[in-house]
Image: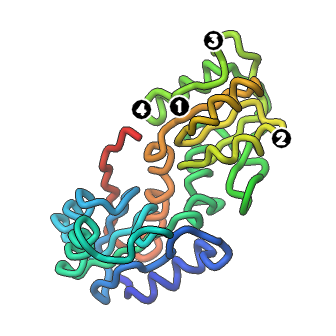
Amino acid sequence: MITQKELADYLEQLLNVSSFKDYCPNGLQIEGRRLIKRLITGVTANLALLDAAIALQADAIIVHHGYFWRNEPATLTGMRHQRVKRLLINDINLFAFHLPLDAHPALGNNVQLGQRLGLTIHAHFGAQDLAVYCDLPVPIKLTELIERVDQTLHRPAQVFGVSDPKEQPALQRVAWCSGAAQNYFESAIMAGCDVFLSGEVSEQTVHIATESGVPYLAIGHHASERYGVQALGEHLAQKFGLEHQFIEIANPV
């Protein structure tokens, strides 16, 4: 068991929160009960996740996508009211960590995704050094990387910029960034990367991939960000003796 303040302070230091410029507040977003024993983690603090946590009598929830995003309405009405009401009535703490969780060198989304795809981070690039790449000791075919994504994330990657993946030259420098990081694509090309993976794709991404000849793989925003929060929850469970469960709320995007 740990107090809410002890957990908040520990997470602030562990994830180096103060070093990031983010689009939302990182840390404790909704205050709940003082003592925490049962912890639930998930990707997004949607209503389905909250209801699952309530059913499991959670004391705290940690997510990657929380509340109070920049440029969102400041009023707690409609959907936002229902979510916050659930937490307050049930006295559950909500913690959210966005960019700090993407970037953490051991527990972050990027390193955890890389591990599952057999990729070890060698360098960082882009704004706040959030995007990463790996120089493979032995080049692999694009078709092999696509197959790894399919088998690991249990969803097919959308592949842009190549007409036939089987004809694409072998890949040596593989870059990736979880979530909606398509804006890092040109930086990856400038860094000499042979392929870039991220969760989402924009209209202009298709043209950049086609004209540069560098393949772009859209692997799913939700799918690419499932692993950091799981690793964080497991770490906290081991360190503080907490009961921990990750709740998967499926999302095709």
Left or right of 249? Residue 216 is right
Residue 128 at x, y percent in the picture = 72, 63
Task: Please identify, in this view, whether the residue under mark 2 or under mark 1 is nearer the observer.
Answer: 2
- Give the spatial CA distance, label 4 vs label 1: 8 Å
Q: Residue at x 31, y 89 (%)?
A: 34
Categorize mark 1 by other alpha carbons within 10 Å: few (<14), some (14-19), many (20+): many
Disc 3 secondary structure class: loop
Q: Which residue is mark 2?
A: 190
Q: Residue at x 67, y 36 (%)?
A: 196
Q: Are marks 4 and 3 in contact (CB under 8 Å)?
A: no
Kind of residue at disc 4? His
- Give the spatial CA distance, label 2 vs label 3: 23 Å
Task: Please identify, in this view, whether the residue under mark 3 or under mark 1 is nearer the observer.
Answer: 3
Work out which quarter of the rendered image holds the C terminus and state it: top left
Task: Determine whether 94 is above or below 40 in the image.
Answer: below
Q: Which residue is mark 3?
A: 164
Q: Which residue is mark 1?
A: 149
